[in-house]
């Protein structure tokens, strides 16, 4: 027999957390790009970007299963990856 539908318990972490200042603002969302976009823009294989995120070598934001990267962080990673012999990113 079912109880009152209005009595719900809190079962663990919410899928979407509260907005964090600076991370989820409209300006920041427009600046963040996916690993696929970063791969094209900075000419770095996507698997290297994802591997660097998994190893903690590249700062990223994870939203459910999606990775979001800041172009400035990718540029710094590209400089290290290419030994500082890198030009400006392609647009």
Image (tube, rainbow, N blue to C red):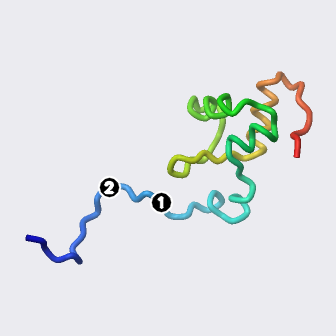
Residue 22 sits above or below residue 79 on the image: below
Residue 31 is tagged as none
Residue 72 sits above or below residue 32 on the image: above
**Percent of width and height locating residue 60:** 63, 43
Q: Do the residues labelled 1 and 2 touch (CB within 8 Å)?
A: no
**Residue 6 in which image quadrant:** bottom left
The kind of secondary structure element at disc 1 is loop
- Residue sitting at 67 percent across and 28 percent down? 48
**Percent of width and height locating residue 14:** 40, 59
The kind of secondary structure element at disc 2 is loop
**Percent of width and height locating residue 86:** 88, 29
Q: Name the residue under label 2.
A: 12
How many C-alpha atoms fall within 10 Å of the one at disc 2: few (<14), some, or many (≥20)?
few
**Percent of width and height locating residue 10:** 29, 63
**Residue 82 in which image quadrant:** top right
Residue 52 sits above or below residue 28 on the image: above
> How many numbered circles are shown?
2
Q: Name the residue under label 1.
A: 16
Furthest toward the top, the residue is: 83
Furthest toward the left, the residue is: 1
Quick check: 5 left or right of 61?
Answer: left
- Residue sitting at 81 percent across and 41 percent down? 41
Image quadrant occupied by the N terminus = bottom left
- Residue sitting at 63 percent across and 57 percent down? 23
- Residue sitting at 61 percent across and 35 percent down? 53
How many C-alpha atoms fall within 10 Å of the one at disc 1: few (<14), some, or many (≥20)?
few
């Amino acid at each position: 027999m079912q109880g009152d539908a209005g009595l719900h318990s809190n079962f663990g972490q919410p899928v979407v957390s509260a907005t964090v200042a600076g991370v989820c603002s409209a300006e920041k969302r427009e600046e963040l790009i996916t690993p696929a976009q970063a791969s094209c823009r900075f000419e770095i294989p996507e698997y290297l970007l994802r591997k660097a995120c998994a190893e903690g070598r590249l700062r990223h934001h994870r939203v459910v299963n999606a990775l979001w990267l800041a172009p400035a962080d990718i540029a710094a990673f590209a400089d290290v990856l290419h030994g500082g012999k890198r030009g400006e990113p392609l647009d």
